[in-house]
Amino acid sequence: MMEMRSEMAVIQPRARSGPLPKRGLPWGRWFHWLYCSLSYIFLLSPMIVVIGASLHGGEYYTAIKFPPEDPSFQWYFKIPAAQFHALGLSFLLGGAATLGACLVGIPAALGIVRSNLPLKTLISALFRAPLQIPAIVTGIAFLQLYFLVGDATGLYAQGTFLGLYLGHFFVATPYVIGTVTAILQRFDNRLEEAALSLGASRWRTFRRVTLPVIMPGVYAGALYSFMVSFGDVPISIFLTAPGFTTYPVELFYGLENDFDPSILASASLVIFFCLIVLLGMQKLVGLEALLRSGSR
Amino acid sequence: MSRVLLTRVVKKFGDFTALKSLDLEVKEGEFLTLLGPSGCGKTTTLRLIAGFLTPTSGTILLGDEDVTRVAPQHREIGMVFQDYALFPHLTISDNIGFGLQERGYPKDKIRQRVDELLDLIQLPEVHDRYPSEVSGGQQQRIAVARAVAYPPRVMLMDEPLGALDLKLREAMQVELRRIQQELGITTVYVTHDQTEAMNMSDTIVVMNLGEIEQMGSAEEIYNHPKTSYVANFVGQVNTLPGRLLGRGDGVVTIGTDIGEFRCASQGEAAAGSAVMIAIRPESIRLISGASGDSDASDGTVNRVSGTVSTRRFAGNLVSILVSMEDGSTMTLEDHPRNLDVQPGEQVTLAWRVSESTLLTE
C-alpha cells in the first residue's frame, strides 16, 4: 500500500488553523434584509404616495401633497360620476377582451404546439406580433383602419364599443397564446392517449384532461390580458370618444385638465379593489393549482 | 379463439419502415411480451394495437372484429404507460373510475368498482389522494387498476416498470402477473428487459429491426434460440463460429478453430455452410487439469482445454473467463464450489451435446 502511494502524486491536506467558519454570517443576513426592504419600498412607494395624498383634508389645491395634511375622506365623496362610468366600461372591456383572448388564444396555442403546418414558425410569429408593435402605433393603425373601412362603407368604428374592443382584443390575445403555449410544451401527450384508451371522445378528452391540466396557463394568460386591457392608454386614447372613455383615459384627461385629489381617491379605490381581487384569485386558484399541474 | 390478430401489418414513417409485414397472434388470456432493443418496432406494434397509429397496410383484429381503422376510444383497450400518465388533477378514485364515468355508469356502481380494484391492487386507503401524493410503485398499480376498471379486450403495457428501481421492479413483476391472471386479461407487454420478459410471460416475441426474430415460451427462447441475435439478447451465450462438416441422427459435427464439436440440430443447414454453436455459460462444466473423464468416448460430451484468465465472484455465482488457444474466450458460470480455480490454471471445459444449439446466422 505504501509503495503504491509513493508512485502517485502526493497531495498533503493543508493544515487548518483556527475554528471552522460558521455559516449564516450576520452581515449577510442584514444585507439580505436591507436589499429586500429597499426593493419593496421602491415598488410600493408610488402606491403609498397616491393613497396617502388622496386623504388630503385641506381646501382645494393643484399639487400632490404627501404626507396628507389633516387626513379625511372628503375627496372620496367628490369623485365625478364620469369616472365610475369609465371604470364600468373598462371592466366590461377587460372582461370581454380576456374572454375573446381565451377563446382564440387556447385553440391557437394548441395549433402552434401540436400541428406540423409548414408555416408554423411564421404563424406563431404573427400571433406574437402585437406585442412587438409599440402600442401607440397599434392605436393609430386601428384608427386609420376604421377611417378606411368607414369611408368605404359608411360605418365608422372609432368611438364605439366594437372599435375599442377589437383594439384591446388585438393586444390581449398574444398573452394567452404565450402562457398556454408554454404550458402545452410541457404537456405529456400520453395523458390524452390514456383518456382516449379509456373510452373518452376527443372533445371529452379535451374537456376533462387537456383543459384542466393547462388551466394554470389559461389563468395566468387571462390575468395578463385583463391587466393589459384594463391599464391601456395609448390604444384606447385613439379609439375612445368624449363621453365614451375607459378608466385610465379618463384619469389621464383628469390629470391633464382639472386635477384635484378626487382622482387620487378614485385611483386608491381601484388599487384596493385590485388587491382584493388578486388575494381572492390567489386563494381560489393561485399557487396550489400551479404547483399541482406542474408536478405529476 | 384469438383475441388479438395482426396480419401482414406494415408501418412506415416516411422513408423509414418500422414494421415489415408482421404476423402476430395473441391468444385469449395470454400474457405475451414483445422483447427487443429500442427501435425494433415493439412499441410501434403496441401503438398500432391501441389505435394511436394506423398501419400502412395489413389488418388488426380484436376478437373477431376488424379494428384496423377504428379510433382508440372505440377499441375498449386498457393501456399502461411507462410514466403512468395518471391524471394529475383528479383524485385516485376519479382516475380509476375515469373509463367507467366516460361510459356513463352510475356513481354508486363506479364507487363499488373502484373499491374492488383498490382492494385488488392492495391500496385500499388512497381514494381521495392525488397521484403526486403516492409513490412510483403505487402510481403504477393505480395505472393498472385504471386500465382494467372497464374490462378491456386487451391490456397493453409499454415498459410499465421502466421507471422503478430494481427491487421494486421485481416485486411489481410478481404483482402485475398476479393481477393479470386473477382477471384473466389478454395482455401485450413491451419491454427491453429479458429478465422481466422471462419472469412474466406465457409467450415471448423477440423482435429485431421491425421483424419477429423468434416467438415461443421463455424456455424455448432461452434453450433453443434460432439465431445468434436471440441467443445473445436473451441471456449470455458463448458462440463458436465454424463450418458444418457432417450430419448424423439429430446431431451435426462442426469444425472450428479450436477443434471439432458435436452439436444438437434439427435444422436443415447444409454441409459446408457457415454456422455457429451456442453454449450457455451455465451449461459448461469444468474439469481441472488434463482430460481423462469416463464419458469421453461415448460422444455425448464435447470438451476443449484452455487457460483461466479472470475469475469474478458474484455471491451465489462465480463466472470465469477461459482463454482458448486461438485467443478467443469462453465464459462459465457455476456455483462457487464448482469453480474453485485461479487465473493462470490449465483447465478442460466440457458440455453436453444436447445443451448446445446450432445457429445458422
Image: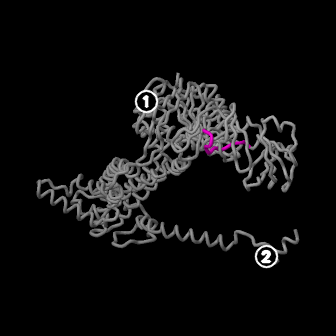
Residue at 56% in and 24% down: B28
Question: Horizontal placement of A260 versus A32: left or right?
Answer: left
Q: CA distance from mark 2 to mark 1?
A: 70 Å
What numbered label is drawn on residue B79? Answer: none
> Would you place residue B301 above or below residue A233 in this image?
above
Front-lying residue, A75 or B71: B71
Question: Horizontal placement of B204 versus A93: left or right?
Answer: right
The figure's colour scheme reads one colour
Q: Is any atom of residue B236 visible in this view?
A: no
Residue lying at the far top in this picture: please name it: B1
Residue B71 occupies quadrant: top left
**Kind of residue sitting beneath label 1:** Val
Mark 2 and mark 1, same subunit? no
> Would you place residue B113 above or below residue A270 in this image?
above
Residue A74 occupies quadrant: bottom left
Residue A142 spot, x, y in % from top left: 23, 60
Q: Mark 1: few, some, or many residues within 10 Å (few <14, many ≥20)?
A: some
Residue A46 spot, x, y in % from top left: 44, 68
Residue A248 occupies quadrant: bottom left
**Kind of residue sitting beneath label 2:** Ala
Q: Mark 2: few, some, or many residues within 10 Å (few <14, many ≥20)?
A: few
Considering the numbered disc 2 on the image, is that residue within a helix, a strand or a loop? loop
> Mark 1 sits on what residue?
B67
Residue B25 spot, x, y in % from top left: 53, 29
Front-lying residue, A121 or A98: A121
Residue at 40% in and 39% down: B56
Residue A194 spot, x, y in % from top left: 50, 38
Give the letter of the chain under mark 2: A
> Mark 2 sits on what residue?
A9
The stretch of residues the image draws in magenta is: B270-280
Give the letter of the chain under mark 1: B
Considering the numbered disc 1 on the image, is that residue within a helix, a strand or a loop? loop
